[in-house]
Image (cartoon, coloured by chain):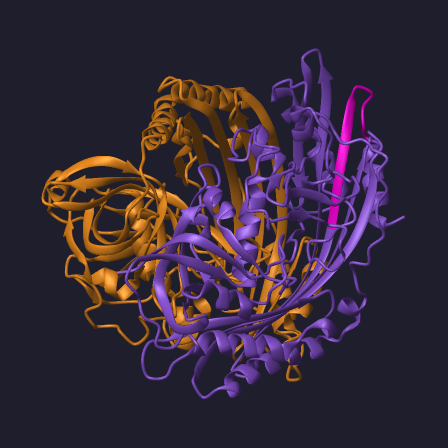
Amino acid sequence: MNNTLVEHDVLARTLGEAMARGAEFAEVFVEDRTTSSAMLDQRRVEQLSSGHDRGAGIRVVVGDTTGFAHTADLTESGLKAAARAAAAVARGGGGGVREIALGALRDNPSHATILPGDVDKARKIELMNRADDAARSEGSSITQVQVALGDSTRQFIVANSDGLFAGDHQVRTRFNVSCIAKGDTGMQTGYRPIAGTRGFELLSADAVADAARGAARQAITKLDARPAPSGDLPVVLAGGSGGILFHEACGHGLEADAILKQASVYAGKVGQLVASPLVTLVDDGTVEGEWGYLAIDDEGRPGARNVLIENGVLTEYMWDYLRSRKEGRVSSGNGRRQSYQHLPMVRMTNTYLLEGDSDADEIVAQTPYGVYVAQLGGGQVNTATGDFVFGMTAAFMIEDGKITAPLRDCNLIGNGPDVLQRVDAVASDFSMTPGTCGKNGQSVPVGTGQATMRLTGVTIGGAAA
Amino acid sequence: MSQLLEHAQRILESARGDEEIEVYVASGVDTEVQSYQGEVEELTTATSNGFGIRILNDGAGGARVGTAWAGSLDDEAIVNALREARDNATFATEDEFVAFARPDGVGAVSLTLSDDAVASTPLEEKIAMAIELERLVRGGDTRIRQVDSANYSDYVAEAAIASTTGIRASYARTGAYVSVEAIANDGGDDQTGWGLSAGRAPHELDVEKAAADAIRRATRMLGAVKPKSFKCTAVFDPRTAATLFSIIGGALSGEAVVRGRSFFANRVGEMVATPSFTLLDDPTDARHFGASVYDGEGLACRRNVLIEKGQLRGFVYDTVSARRAGTASTGSAVRGGIAGSPSAGCRALQLAPGHVDQAEILRRVGNGVFVESLIGVHSGVNPVSGDFSVGVTGLMIRDGQLAEPVREITVASTLQRMLLDVVQVGNDLEWLPGAAAGQSVAIDNIAVSGT
């Protein structure tokens, strides 16, 4: 696969046009994305869909102002028209079309072994059926099984007026199983995702069957669930999806766009103790194969491993080009965008808590009373106040150091800086979970990870009296 | 005939004798301005177009459908999409209920949902509105410490649907919005509030009201505390009530019902809500921002009563879910742009207004919690089981009046129970962007979780 979406010279001339009215920076981002998806619902194969999208987003920066335009017309005249639209924010000034010296393309290959386009659709359907069978084998109370398989092949090039010219090929595959179990108490749901920045090799027959059985068991278990408690209790988060806690409790608040606008509770706190000494938090775009992996970000900057909090001390924020330029520093490789139709902004990649040395079972055994959360489903944060929620989709009571009754779904709520202080044990059974992160209307794939850990107290938003 | 409809019809000419084709073509022009510290921080101008094709083959055991889409309208993209959609169809399971919509004799109402002023208003005026919005918020109260973003945005959207089964539909829609988030501080913790004004054109926007809303919401949260957990009656303001109605609307989708994913399944005729609760989906009401002449399959939109005086009357259906349920489409297909397949959904929900205003509701409730903003709706509501638990900021209600602000709490119940526990419905109907309008409602037996 060659990255020849737009020729070198055309990009250089487009950048020249974008700079003609006196801009300080211009960038052309050209993207080509092919996607496919299919669903198996109640054993019926449906909604097989293929999509193709291609276009360019052009931004022009003048002072603190960014102009942006995008187009699906990748001819030189189409690109130049978009460049002029983006440059409209630069009033007056100028001096005519500028000469931009663009380097040679630094391209990055995909690490996928089996490309989506090379996979027989019949093989995909076979895997979905296998998941369906596996889910139903867990019990007759499983009344609904829905399996979704999707992949995307995204190649892009980015060129800017500093001479940067880089490209990437990103292949992503995902497979989700959703189950519904029906009992005397109504319906309950179970869900398991598999997702990675990989090709079809991600999906072994065993892996999809495991996920399906896990989703089915989760739904069946919840048939006996009682309403979750209401109020402040110790919480043990199982390894994996608990990483969403850090994504919401501090991840978004450490993004430099919120920091520079003083719209984060973490602004001005570098060097300060903001968390329990057990917390070392990393955002890491370099974890190959993970859902949030990237060779380069959407501004052409190499993905990087950035330590955000070290032993409880805030060490660094996450940066994109625009925000780092204002501060006279370099980007941390966190400039991402949903597509060519969107402006890049500061985003997380794979955000995880480094593991500790406690034993997961012992953490539970040493918790007399509390809640054990086996799976979290998502969350949201107000970065300015630090208040955040995250939802539990599989949870149990802990009584006398033992995991007991299953609980119905609910949100947990806390305040980031407060909850970070409450981490009092971290185990060594680290794992990661894929997710989709939404910010200002843009969605990007991210990973979160952590080992089993305990919070001394967090508010459980259950409906129990 | 609209250009897009001509385009869609041209693609239909590629149909082979043994297949049906449905084409959805869409185009849009978007403008977005963000003001920060009195300057334009971001200005986006964009045009986009694309199409989605569905191809249907009839077989002995039913029909099979394959889909493809592309973000352009050039010939090569169309040829490729036709090929992909045909190939996808061969892998689908034959299904006797799968079909494309056919004209059903229901006439489309005439609605004016677009305003040329969106296109004709000079960009400078749009920029000025965003800057003015920010200025009003910053200058409106000394406790406003920061304005995170002040935005103006608008769009002109056009779409057409044509099929070999006789569908011909096209429509245009415009919208304009201003929104702002304010951060207030008076020496303690920061608090936020956002304001919004929406219309179909820039001149319909009320920038001063949006600014005042953001200021009021941020400043009245100052000093908010986390209370102890308790059970009470919660009063949802029109905005948060609209979110609640949208969630309930999701469970009233015929698609969710036939897929066994709705707690309303098999309950038509039952009392599922309090008698003061009448919920309808009416896209033919031009005042609603979800109003539409045609649905996502090109059938005329119509008024559907879903819950009447507490009794479940029915669901909204698209063609396939209706056939599965043994009924007819209610003209309620929605589709998520060019890449989405049609499914059944509500687009213009409204609750029949009650007879009391918000102040009277508060007086009648006496003591409880007033819910002003929600967080974590996607992670805390399970539309299948009905479990409901969301993060909230708001104010305590004491002696029938709004009292001290509260934060970092959740409110919880189940959707099934909440509908039966609606004790007051307000007359303060507010048209809001999205699939639901809102008005104040009071709901009993809410668990508030705090410390």
In the image, residue B21 lies in the stretch drawn in magenta: yes
Taking the image as shown, residue B106 lies to the left or right of residue A60, namely: right
Would you say residue A107 is visible in this rendering? no
Q: Which span is picked out in magenta?
A: B14-26
Q: Nearer the viewer, residue B192 or A66?
A: B192
Give the residue furthest to the top. Answer: B60
* Number of marks: 0
Q: Which residue: 82% across, 43% down?
A: B169
Task: Say which of A259 and A91 sits in front.
Answer: A259
Inspect the magenta stretch and tell me whether residue A428 lies in it. Answer: no
Residue drawn at 45 percent across, 41 percent down? B386
Q: Is residue A430 visible?
A: yes
Quarter occupied by residue A324: bottom left
Q: In the rendered view, does B270 fall on the left or right side of A419?
A: right
Question: Residue B401, how many percent across, how many down?
Answer: 45, 73
Q: Residue at x 25, y 57 (%)?
A: A281
* A43 and B44: which is toward the camera: A43
x then y, percent, for residue A358: 11, 46
Rendered location of residue A115, percent (x, y): 48, 32
Quarter containing the C terminus of chain B: bottom left
Give me the chain that's orange: A
